[in-house]
Amino acid sequence: MILTLTETERQVALAISVAVALCGLALAAAGNQDTMEIHGWLILAFGGICALVVIREIWGPEPPKSRLESYYDEPIKFGIAASMAWAVVAMFVGVWVAALLAFPDLTFDGAWASFGRLRPVHTSGVIFGFGGNALIATSLHVVQRTSRARLPDQLSAWFVLVGYNLFCILAASGYLLGVTQSKEYAEAEWYADIWLVIVWVTYFILYIRTLARRKEPHIYVANWYFMAFILVVAILHSINNLAVPVSLGHAKSYTIWSGVQDAMVQWWYGHNAVAFFLTAGFLGMLYYYLPIRAQRPIFSYRLSILSFWGITFFYMWAGSHHLHYTALPHWVQTLGMTFSVMLLVPSWASAGNALLTLNGAWHRVRDDATLRFMMVAAVFYGISTFEGSFLAIRPVNSLSHYTDWTVGHVHAGALGWVALITFGSLYTLVPSLWKREGMYSPALVEWHFWLSLAGTLVYIFAMWNSGIIQGLMWRTYTEEGTLAYSFLDSLRAMYPYYIARAFGGLLFLIGAVIGAYNMWMTVRAAPAKAPLESDVPLNAAVAAAGRG
Amino acid sequence: MDISHDALVAFSKSWGLFYLIGLMIGVLIYTFRPSNRGKFNRAKQSVLDQDDKPWT
């Protein structure tokens, strides 16, 4: 891993590791007694370990010049491993928080295990840990292949992936300690946020530099989606996290926006995190790995361009549908609602494009669980975008808001679309990156597929039921005009659904564990692919052999 | 300068609309321009190429 870096790059890597470790030391010293001190030591240890890894091989031989004749895939392999590790951990925490709602004693009397602290570990762990690592890894794979160009250097990609995982660790460990900004999907505190800006800008520059080196004149549409993902997430993250720390020695900060402005900025961020983190990037995966796996070109390239511009420009305005019936001006709510409904057009264009690509390859969908992952992901993308547009309509929202229906909707998207397209892409990518004939066990891929699908369906049906029941109980009045049910009544009614939800999540988790095991064994034990025969006419090869 | 709420709403209702329509026209022209057809068809097919090496 270190040996693939040039000597200069190793020295820079060492300098960065030491600098990170020193920043950690400074944070630990400044954050005396504060929770920040623990993070300081954590950063110090992280930087120290990175420095040790580099030092061990810093004087090793220079990588051969012939490296420039192949793509640079080492960091991508790391990203895939990190992604699956986060998937297992964060989905486990997800099952735990789901179980907490039915069995509140599962906190074991630890403050760190309370629902409010564990839940962001689950959400950030799956979105940023699992999804983010998979996005970075696949984007770096796709941009090299579709540009026919190697990454411009060896160090940047490592910096992005390792640095990004430091952010994820800081975020998750902080939540357990009680460090939080209390902003949905943006809970990490100011020092972690600043670090993520540095990492993300490096990622953006790396992507642009690779595109600038492209040998293919046209930039394939998957890259447009990945670019939108990188660029918009940078903007969203920087603006939503503008905050002033209590002091440089404190983890706590206060956002510079206040009141309804803060709510608007937060949900502009929150909804576009769904749009550009959880949709655009994964559409990039879809537009590359689906055609590859189905061995058919995308149904309509033009449609993919039209839906790209539709999605990028419509999504930007949809965030205010999270704030129906609040202090937000009425016209801003209406704006959000209108754009959310319009979004159905480009969303279904993408889902339809994916499904029509499979037209003529249905026999492969039947036989190949990996392709089936992607097919079902496209179907869930269609379902959850329809549901999203529907829930954004103000009167519908009056029933669904603050209920489990929203949770069900999010999971239809996150499990059914995001996770399934990721698994499909990784099952395509892993054998090709590690040069294996195929996955270690196709039967385990089948198991993973059916467990995921069953888990998702159990989950969303449970949440639809409980959400609608909740919504109806909260708005039922007696003849005297008082509420018919107390909040506790509605909570009791949720009990069976919460158990069903935890069970659905458990099925999904088992699937993910099987997937991680299968990928691990593919790397360890699956037979290597025979190298491609040389591209020399047979006669010449025979003649050459004869001469030798 | 004092910007009133109404002025801001009027601005976004007019220019916001025009720029989205303008964008749509631009995208439609780019997408359906006959001279782009060959480029798009090549792009669509080229991801299926089997060779796994950067071009030099």
Image (spheres, coloured by chain):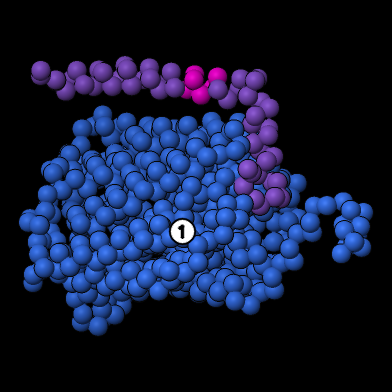
Which residue does the image show at 57% across and 52% down from the upper left? A68
Describe the element under mark 1 as helix, strand or loop: loop
| Residue that label 1 marks | A6
Residue A93 x/y as whole percent = 36, 71
Chain letter, blue in picture: A
Closer-to-camera residue (A14/A109): A14
Whether residue A491 is visible to the viewer of this picture, yes or no, is no
Would residue A143 be counted in the magenta stretch? no
Residue in the picture at 36% in, 48% down: A202
The amino acid type, in three-letter code, at marker 1 is Thr
Write down the chain letter for disc 1.
A
In the image, the segment drawn in magenta is B24-29
Residue A266 place in picture, x, y as percent: 24, 45
Residue B16 % position (x, y) = 33, 21
Dot 1: few (<14), some (14–19), or many (≥20) neighbours within 10 Å? some
Quadrant into which the C terminus of chain A falls: bottom right
Q: Eyeballing the image, is A107 above or below A403?
A: below
A473, above or below A116, in the image: above
Side (left or right) of A383 relative to A486: right
